[in-house]
Image (cartoon, rainbow, N blue to C red):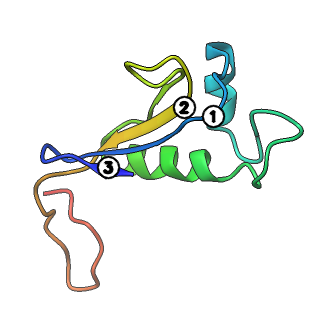
Amino acid sequence: MTLTQEGRLIVANDGLVLPRETFDRLTARFERAGARTDGSGLGLAIVAAIAERIGSHLVLDSPRPGASSGFQASIWLPTEVPLTSEKGAVSDA
């Protein structure tokens, strides 16, 4: 996992290359890359929902940029702190 100075959060592995046509499916709840893949299929769905909520988007790459293998997921995090209301909810200011 890497967090760049510009606010980009990157999670990558050295696993097998995933076909690009599976990317849309991987952000759906309970979807996994394959039947033999570990996990519940919720991770990327949760990250995609968080990214959308903060005004960002999830970027998936396979193989990893500059590599011949692996998978990478990244989102841009806000670099400014949002205003909050008295109850702690994010303001639309």
Q: Earlier in the sequence, mark 2 or mark 3?
A: 3
Q: Secondary structure at mark 2?
A: strand
Q: Residue at x 32, y 40 (%)?
A: 56
Who is closer to the viewer here, 72 or 76? Answer: 72
How far across and down, in percent of the image, does residue 20 sit?
61, 15
**Which is closer to the viewer, label 1 or label 2?**
1
The residues tagged by marks 1 and 2 sit, at their Cα atoms, a distance apart of 7 Å
Crowding at dot 2, Cα within 10 Å, few <14 / some 14-19 / many 20+, comes out as many
How far across and down, in percent of the image, does residue 36 sit?
87, 41
Crowding at dot 1, Cα within 10 Å, few <14 / some 14-19 / many 20+, comes out as few
Crowding at dot 3, Cα within 10 Å, few <14 / some 14-19 / many 20+, comes out as few
Who is closer to the viewer here, 87 or 3? Answer: 3
**Is 13 left, or right, of 11 in this rendering?**
right
Q: Secondary structure at mark 1?
A: loop
Q: Which residue reaches farthest right? A: 35
Three-letter amino acid code of the residue under disc 2: Phe
The residues tagged by marks 2 and 3 sit, at their Cα atoms, a distance apart of 14 Å
Q: Which residue is mark 3?
A: 2
Q: Residue at x 27, y 80 (%)?
A: 88
Q: Is residue 60 above or below residue 55?
A: above
Q: Earlier in the sequence, mark 1 or mark 3?
A: 3
On residue 71, the disc is 2
Q: Are marks 1 and 2 in contact (CB under 8 Å)?
A: yes
Quadrant in which the C terminus appears = bottom left
The residues tagged by marks 1 and 3 sit, at their Cα atoms, a distance apart of 17 Å
Q: Secondary structure at mark 3?
A: strand
How far across and down, in percent of the image, does residue 77 sit?
26, 49
Q: Which residue is mark 1?
A: 15
**Which is closer to the viewer, label 1 or label 3?**
1
Q: Is residue 55 above or below residue 87?
A: above
